[in-house]
Image (cartoon, rainbow, N blue to C red):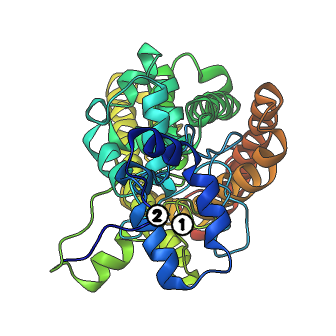
Amino acid sequence: MASPSPMLPSSPSARHHHQSSSPHLGQLHLHGQHPRSRLALLRSLPLRLRLAIPRPRLPLALPSSTGGGNNNDDDDGNNNSGGGGGGDDETGDGGGEWGGNRGEALFVLAQAGRKLSSLPADLAAAVEGGRVTGDIVRRFAEMDASPLLRWLLRFRGFRERLLADDLFLAKLAMEMGVGMIAKTAAEYEKRRENFVKEIDIVIADVVMAIVADFMLVYLPAPTVSLQPPLARNAGLITSFFHNCPDNAFQIALAGRSFSILQRLGAIVKNGAKLFAVGTGASLVGTGVTNALIKARKAVDKDLDDEIDDIPVVSTSIAYGIYMAVSSNLRYQILSGVIEQRMLEPVLHKQKLLLSALCFAVRTGNTFLGSLLWVDYARMVGVQKAEEEI
């Protein structure tokens, strides 16, 4: 049996003296001694001194972005500072429960006094997967305080767009307001003295224009992707379009990058949707207009030579193609390039000026679209060259 170390004091007073001075003694004796003698000295120390090893502590505050979202660069070398789509299968999590996007988002939730279960299911899943930043969660908490926005946030489509762009609702109202005024002015210019008499036809045309304007803002708007992952047995085409952004030019967030092919896919995907929307809206609008014209002709026979029926099918298909090509490209460039990449990074702290410039740009885009539609409609033959719109 090994004998006690000769360096361990035996009396209580000597033991007390050794405990109080042992750190200094250890420093004096450890230098210049053989490793075995150092080990013997360490073993001679009381157990509580040998186990007094400082443990690493979690930081009291996480490094959080404070200006405008995540500052990771996307594949185009652009700074991510506002909205955009997160990846479905890429977490962007820097590591651990308190690292990366997930830790930042959970920390923001704790600061707001909310639990993960208080978020919508898709947003909570995106937080767990590290697909959204803390800035997105903070924006949701701020919007949730408004009764109107809280109601809109219940719908995933609006939720994805509002979280990507806090001015999305204002842009939607701008576009629909400008479209309604522009369409009404065009109808008045076309009908003049018959404007009041044909007010029912005017209303049908304006409603059709409002529906089209709504979809032209809604579909190409940048989004925060909250869609659940696709099933493994999904087809290649479905998987490809599922991973495409909603806007070909939008800034990618949460570590996600979009390839050129995926950005081209966004144009095709939105073009197909806008073709369906434009054709459907035109079918309803021209159908209702022709029905009202026929009803008027049945009452007033003098109108037979004054008003011609509108070709429903050809006009609807032509309008669908126009929306899928011209409107689709113009509104994607407007939302993804002019607003998100040019105006918002410079004026993100001056919301009033930013809104005014967005209004001016969207008004000019609507006017340009009206001119292009007239030329296109005359070129394909759905309108006569002498008609003025």
* Label 2 element class: loop
Between residue 142 and residue 46, name the one nearer to us. Answer: 46
Image: 270 above or below 109 = below
Mark 1: amino acid: Gly
Residue 242 circle label: none
- Residue 131 point in image, percent of width and height: 43, 57
Mark 1 touches mark 2? (CB < 8 Å)? no
Q: Residue at x 43, y 33 (%)?
A: 109
- Residue 223 point in image, percent of width and height: 50, 51
Q: Quadrant of residue 362?
A: top right
Q: Is residue 276 visible?
A: yes
Between residue 218 and residue 386, name the one nearer to us. Answer: 218
The quadrant the N terminus occupies is bottom left
Q: Is residue 386 visible?
A: no
The quadrant the C terminus occupies is top right
Q: Quadrant of residue 65?
A: top right
Residue of label 2: 7
Image: 149 above or below 94 = above
- Residue 189 point in image, percent of width and height: 71, 32
Residue 255 circle label: 1
Image: 81 above or below 86 = above
Q: Residue at x 58, y 53 (%)?
A: 23
